Image (cartoon, rainbow, N blue to C red):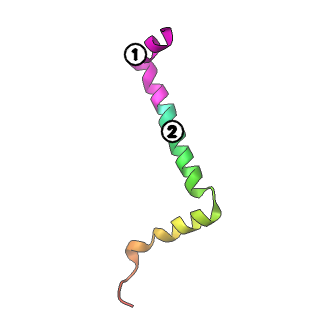
Amino acid sequence: MELFLWFTKFENTKPLALVIFFTVFCGILLYLYGSRSRGERIEEHKNIPLLDEDK
């Protein structure tokens, strides 16, 4: 029960939320750029707005 009371204090939940969000952010980056082929494909997608439609 004391663990639940620890979560009710605002000064305890802010650092915990920061750690959770940072971990999720790093996980997303590792997922996206972990594979070389996926990373190269993402790098190609960044130029899509600059491509001309008229060829």
Q: Secondary structure at mark 2?
A: helix
Question: Magenta stretch containing residue 25, yes or no?
Answer: no
Q: Which residue is mark 1?
A: 8
Amino acid at dot 1:
Thr
* Furthest-left residue in this view: 54
Give the mark nearest the N terminus, 1 or 2: 1
Amino acid at dot 2:
Phe
Q: Residue at x 62, y 66 (%)?
A: 37
Residue 48 sits above or below residue 11 on the image: below
Q: Secondary structure at mark 1?
A: helix
The residue stretch that appears in magenta: 1-17
Disc 1 + disc 2, Cβ < 8 Å: no
- In terms of depth relative to the viewer, which is nearer, 15 or 3? 3
Q: Which mark is residue 22?
A: 2
From the top left corner, tell me how far across and down residue 28 is, in percent.
53, 49
Q: Residue at x 35, y 88 (%)?
A: 54
| Disc 1 versus disc 2: nearer the observer | 1
Q: Residue at x 59, y 50 (%)?
A: 30
- Give residue 5's quadrant in the image: top left
